[in-house]
Image (cartoon, helix red, strand yellow):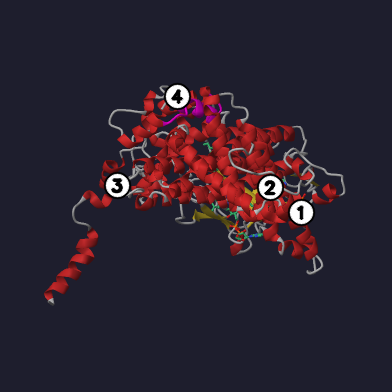
Amino acid sequence: MSALEPTLIRPGDNPDITKERRAATVPVNALAAFIHGGADIVKRRKEIYDAVEAEPALRNNLRLEFLPREQRHEEQARRAVAMTDHATDIIDGSDMFGEGIYYQSLIMGRDLHALSLHYSMVLPAIQNQSDEEQMEEWLELIITRSIVATYAQTELGHGTNLSKLETTATYDPETEEFILHSPTITATKWWPGALGKSSNYAIVMAQLYVKGKHYGPHPFFVQLRHRDTHLPLPGITIGDIGPKLGINGSDNGFLRFNQFRIPRKAMFARNARVEKDGTYVPPKHAKLGFGAMVFVRSIMIKDQATQLAAAVTIATRYAAIRRQGEIVPNGQEVQILDYQTQQYRIFPNIAKTLVFLFAAYEIKDLYLKVTSQLQEGNVSLLPQLHGLSSGLKSIVSWDTAQGIEQCRLACGGHGYSQASGFPDIYSYAVGGCTYEGENIVMLLQVARGLVKLVPGIRSGNPDLTEITAYLGAKPSSKSNFTCAANTSPTDLVAYFEHAAREQLFAAYDFWKANESRYPTSEEAWNKAGIELSKASRLHVKAYLVRNYFNYVSRNTDSKIQGVLLALGKLYALDQLSGAAGAFLRGGFFNDGQISTARHGIYLLLEELRPNAVAIVDSFDISDRELSSVLGRRDGNVYENLLKWAMQSPLNESDISTAYTKHLKPMMVEARSKL
Ligand SMILES: CCCCC/C=C\C/C=C\C/C=C\C/C=C\C/C=C/C(=O)SCCNC(=O)CCNC(=O)[C@H](O)C(C)(C)COP(=O)(O)OP(=O)(O)OC[C@H]1O[C@@H](n2cnc3c(N)ncnc32)[C@H](O)[C@@H]1OP(=O)(O)O
Ligand SMILES: Cc1cc2nc3c(=O)[nH]c(=O)nc-3n(C[C@H](O)[C@H](O)[C@H](O)COP(=O)(O)OP(=O)(O)OC[C@H]3O[C@@H](n4cnc5c(N)ncnc54)[C@H](O)[C@@H]3O)c2cc1C
């Protein structure tokens, strides 16, 4: 290992992990700087980390995994308040995407909390969707935390299909009020984070009715609880929806309205509004009211990549210290990281982590660009942002969940223990496959945008953007792939673009052919759903491969070039061999080339093996953030597993109540009958 990183090796560390760090050839600091966007950012991470560690209120002394839900919920509220109390002293509040997310993960761990939705959806909605008067009234309340707010859209009966939400907002011109009502059980709002017990305000999505005319779902800013007593206001019923797969520090809630009146100015009015006399003024783009969802779809890409980074860090470090079995029978047990199958479970996920992270940087830039254009009333890039954020959200959250599970399995039995960190990482991250738009539904949205391009491309009048430009290229009949070592990033990108283009055309033709088989185009679309979502997947993967190689081409440090290139190739070849059918279509690849791609993967695993620990070290995840006994920097896993288990409340006494109440009487009775 390079002399640049003496701090990573300390006396008392596990000898195997030290051996790995000494043998690595990649400079960890340089790689960390590139991954995080500059040495100054890595330095800021350290400053933020030190400041958090130094502040007693931000110490995480309670181990969340041993707490019952009520205590976990309370502890997370304490942490959320302390986190935001100290935020302005520690982080740059204007950098939510970067410093904000990092600071939050140090303190809150893998859980949502009382203020998650307040910051991630309500704040951006108020900034982007309220008119000046509303902004004046609401923004300060949110920023100062004088109120706590959430985003209440999903109902018991409808999450995906927003056009069929049942909560109504009926305008009464007499009193200049809207009447919110939940007409059925299925109209009950269900799921919103921190709605159950924490929030006293919410953005409520409701169907707008004015003078008997229906205008579709619109957002309203609604007070739910009394500001002093915190009791639900008359006409409102609220509660917690109960324990979930994960994020149990958050009180996801339910909400019902019974003819509940709110003032006219409670309807967000920057994009659409209702005048005093009931005149409806429509928005410039019908989906501007969905902006808060687009924001979270954009920021969650980095959050997901961060969870995968944690999972691969744990699995790699543990595989370096775990010795089990022999490769050549000679009595010397090997580090499990030396098994090719182990490398295959972990290294493609290391590659994915960077592929996703670099895409997160791009979607952040696009989001900021579109937001600033929207301020000027320019909605032209909104469909592009909707398409890219929906597609990335689907692919990244799915592959992250699969990757975390592979890493867990790669840690054997200890991976199943909460000490590993995997149960929290997985249950937190996998929520991202569902929230902000169920993944398949989002892929179908991407397809909806893509198919519109096909007639123009075929007629020689393509209407393409930077992201879809490749669809207009002339198809090649055969790939030039010969071997992984020689293949260039440009070639790899071209293979994915070819496969994505062909799949899109095939899905389009299948849909159109279906139109003669089914009564309507929509039914034909439904029967082409699998092919269409495949087209979206390949389109997003082509974007990911292209974006990765574009991003790493900015690197000027030759010492990290090799590793970055090897990881990009590993991602591309792994995805290529996993979706071989799409590349074999029309003889573009042949069987021999697919098998060459697989052999390329094996060579890349071997090439990356000596630097595996150094690469995950460069993700710069502290033990505090990692919160995993298996993934500790020092590799001293076994003694710390024992220490961790001793914290189990069941170990507070030698004899449990389960024994006294149930097992003892059973055995005593059985013995008496012998
Ligand atoms: C303290 C610091 C904190 C910092 C943050 C730190 C970390 C953050 C990390 C993680 C996140 C943290 C917290 C959040 C966690 C959980 C919160 C979860 C919240 C939620 O889940 S809220 C509810 C989300 N619900 C959905 O997403 C519903 C999904 N459904 C839809 O979006 C749509 O209805 C639909 C399915 C996309 C479309 O329905 P459909 O009926 O088929 O079509 P139409 O609605 O008629 O659309 C026609 C037209 O419009 C286009 N369209 C659709 N949506 C949009 C959009 N948003 N923008 C632009 N255009 C859109 C669509 O493509 C069609 O276009 P056409 O041209 O084809 O007509
Ligand atoms: C952890 C978590 C946090 C959440 N937080 C919030 C929150 O803060 N605020 C909020 O309002 N909501 C929240 N939600 C709700 C979330 O946004 C919805 O669950 C999500 O949008 C999916 O909607 P649904 O549950 O109705 O699923 P459904 O739409 O019922 O989906 C079920 C299945 O049907 C399929 N399906 C549905 N429609 C189609 C279609 N058109 N084409 C093809 N297949 C289809 C889906 O692909 C899926 O397989 C949260 C959910 C979770 C899990």
Q: Are marks 1 and 2 in contact (CB under 8 Å)?
A: no
Observer-nearest residue: 125 or 42? 42
Specify the label residue 330 is tagged with. Answer: 3
Say whether residue 670 is left or right of residue 187: left
Task: Tell which circle, 2 or 4, labels the residue nearer the N-terminal end.
Answer: 4
Q: Nearer the viewer, mark 3 or mark 2?
A: 3
Task: Tell which circle, 3 or 2, labels the residue nearer the N-terminal end.
Answer: 3
The three-letter code of the residue at mark 3 reads Asn
Q: Nearer the viewer, mark 1 or mark 3?
A: 3
Q: Are marks 3 and 4 in contact (CB under 8 Å)?
A: no
Residue identified by numbered label 1: 505
Specify the label residue 539 is tagged with. Answer: 2
The three-letter code of the residue at mark 2 reads His
Q: CA distance from mark 3 to mark 4?
A: 48 Å
Observer-nearest residue: 235 or 323? 323
The main secondary structure of the magenta stretch is helix
Q: CA distance from mark 4 to mark 1?
A: 51 Å
For the residue with label 3, is its CB less than 8 Å from the closest atom of ligand 1?
no
Q: Is residue 565 above or below residue 292?
A: above
**What stretch of residues is rendered in magenta?**
24-38
Say whether residue 471 is left or right of residue 124: right
Residue identified by numbered label 4: 47
Task: Tell which circle, 4 or 1, labels the residue nearer the N-terminal end.
Answer: 4
Task: Tell which circle, 1 or 2, labels the residue nearer the N-terminal end.
Answer: 1
Categorize mark 2 by other alpha carbons within 10 Å: few (<14), some (14-19), many (20+): many
Categorize mark 4 by other alpha carbons within 10 Å: few (<14), some (14-19), many (20+): some
Q: What element does badge 2 sit on?
A: helix
Task: Tell which circle, 3 or 4, labels the residue nearer the N-terminal end.
Answer: 4
Q: Is residue 17 above or below residue 290?
A: above
Q: CA distance from mark 1 to mark 2?
A: 12 Å
Q: What count of labels does the image hold?
A: 4
Q: What element does badge 1 sit on?
A: helix
